[in-house]
């Protein structure tokens, strides 16, 4: 269930999208938003802060609140992890489940999830397609003490949706590390690329709102089918 | 440095000196207020700054906890302050390949919100970290914002010059990352082979008043660069 300020943030985002507002378009003032949503100034402020941290709006003291929505369609937003459905939802995405099994955490997985080597984890391996072309190979390791149950049906669709709505988990934040390498033999077969072609390797650690790590995933992207978007600031 | 930034730095140092790890609990807001003899809102700004840097996270009702990035040597893409800042622990040098005033191309004009009649400083540099080629950077600085740029300035941190000497205040930036293959010229500069992976970061930089001032294309040496994006919130 969303908190009030989160609902309002989502509503403002929908307004931006539905009215096809662009970078630089001015939004209603704080006072106008207070009147429109019938909430306190501090609730609107929290909603705007959330939108600003998402890079959806920009507040300029004395001038107002402006839309900042430069994302080109089809780019995976690295600044905000919401799962693919939100970034690439309008592109036809399908999934082939290659593995769903309970395993003992290796030392590497255990270190990233802050658990003990040997603790139970769900190992999920999926091949994601975009318009029928291989987009990425995703290997996830879910802490079973946080995610007690997974099966093929669940992972064939949005795991984020299952975690949030099925398990009622409060998702917090994540860190993304990535480097560029070369496609190996196993990857070349799945991604339909040549060995030695560029490989974009992302490592993600996902945390609950309590700060507990629950998923460590390694994803190798097809360089031909993917491009990424990152918003940055130079100050706090 | 403003007070809240100084305090943030102290807190960062405290975490490092005490080797605090992911999940370790920090003092409460009130304790920070007393310790630093600062107002609540100043402390809140410091904590916000550190939270955005991915150094700590605040959990309502539970407290403030440490978050530590995995390793050193990752380029933090959520903060865009130029290479000198990112690589302050390393020996940074550059070879100036080109510097001239040009008219904006269609692509540059579109991203800087100008016309193709407007002028930009085109600067092409090969950047080295500890004498190893790191990247080939091609920048287009708006002449109307930065009237003067020469080889002397470009031999060191252009961003530092803009902030310190021209007093420009930077705002946000938008970056797009695509991976391709190196062409012959790029491979030669980076000491790699033609066809090797070519991570390319395309950046538009804005001042704090939302004026775009620099559009740059940076091709990285795929083995010398690792990237990191700390994400503060999921939704």
Image (tube, helix red, strand yellow):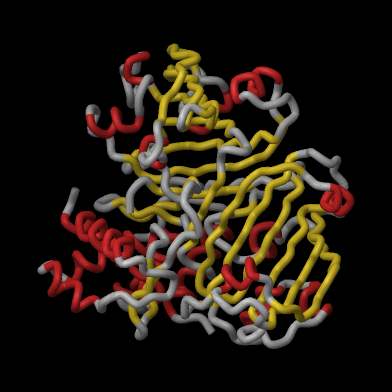
Residue B108 visible in the snapshot: no
Point 48% across, 67% down: residue: B233
Q: Position of residue B175 (x, y in %)?
A: 53, 42
Point 69% across, 79% down: residue: A121
Side of B234 where B166 appears, left or right: left
Point 51% across, 81% down: residue: A2
Identity of the residue furthest to the left in this view = B37
Please tell me in which quadrant of the rendered image residue A50 appears.
Answer: bottom left
Total marks placed: 0
Q: Where is residue A202 in the image (x, y as percent from the top left)?
A: 64, 54
From the viewer's side, name the closer residue of A15 and A61.
A61
Point 79% across, 60% down: residue: A128
- Quadrant that contains the C terminus of chain B: bottom right
Residue A140 visible in the snapshot: yes
Side of A88 where B152 appears, left or right: left
Q: Where is residue A112 in the image (x, y as percent from the top left)?
A: 57, 68
């Amino acid at each position: 269930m969303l908190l009030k300020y989160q609902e309002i943030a989502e509503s403002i985002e929908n307004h931006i999208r539905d009215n096809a507002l662009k970078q630089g378009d001015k939004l209603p003032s704080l006072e106008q938003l207070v009147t429109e949503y019938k909430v306190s100034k501090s609730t609107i402020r929290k909603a705007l802060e959330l939108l600003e941290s998402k890079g959806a709006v920009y507040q300029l003291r004395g001038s107002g609140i402006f839309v900042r929505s430069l994302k080109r369609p089809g780019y995976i937003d690295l600044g905000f992890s919401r799962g693919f459905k939100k970034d690439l939802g309008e592109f036809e995405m399908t999934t082939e489940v290659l593995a769903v099994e309970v395993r003992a955490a290796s030392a590497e997985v255990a270190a990233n999830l802050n658990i003990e080597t040997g603790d139970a984890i769900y190992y999920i391996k999926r091949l994601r397609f975009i318009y029928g072309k291989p987009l990425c190979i995703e290997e996830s390791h879910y802490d079973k003490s946080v995610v007690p149950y997974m099966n093929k049906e669940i992972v064939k669709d949005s795991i984020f949706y299952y975690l949030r709505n099925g398990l009622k988990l409060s998702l917090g934040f994540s860190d993304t590390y990535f480097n560029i390498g070369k496609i190996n033999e196993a990857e070349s077969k799945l991604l339909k690329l040549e060995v030695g072609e560029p490989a974009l390797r992302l490592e993600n650690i996902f945390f609950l709102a309590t700060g507990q790590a629950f998923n460590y995933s390694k994803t190798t992207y097809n360089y031909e089918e993917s491009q990424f978007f990152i918003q940055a600031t130079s100050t706090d | 440095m403003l007070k809240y930034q100084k305090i943030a730095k102290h807190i960062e140092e405290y975490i490092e000196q005490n080797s605090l790890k992911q999940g370790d609990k920090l003092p409460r807001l009130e304790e920070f207020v007393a310790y630093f003899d600062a107002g609540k809102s100043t402390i809140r700004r410091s904590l916000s700054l550190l939270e955005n840097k991915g150094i700590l996270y605040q959990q309502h009702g539970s407290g403030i906890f440490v978050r530590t990035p995995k390793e050193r040597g990752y380029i933090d893409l959520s903060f865009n302050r130029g290479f000198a800042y990112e690589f302050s622990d390393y020996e940074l040098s550059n070879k100036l390949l080109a510097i001239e005033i040009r008219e904006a191309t269609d692509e540059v004009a579109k991203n800087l919100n100008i016309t193709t009649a407007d002028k930009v400083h085109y600067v092409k540099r090969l950047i080295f970290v500890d004498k190893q080629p790191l990247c080939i950077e091609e920048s287009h600085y708006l002449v109307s914002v930065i009237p003067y740029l020469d080889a002397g300035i470009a031999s060191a941190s252009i961003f530092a010059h803009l902030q310190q000497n021209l007093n420009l205040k930077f705002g946000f930036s938008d970056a797009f990352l695509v991976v391709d293959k190196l062409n012959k010229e790029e491979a030669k500069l980076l000491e790699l082979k033609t066809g090797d992976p070519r991570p390319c970061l395309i950046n538009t930089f804005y001042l704090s008043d939302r004026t775009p001032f620099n559009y740059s294309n940076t091709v990285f040496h795929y083995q010398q660069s690792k990237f990191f994006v700390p994400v503060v919130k999921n939704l």
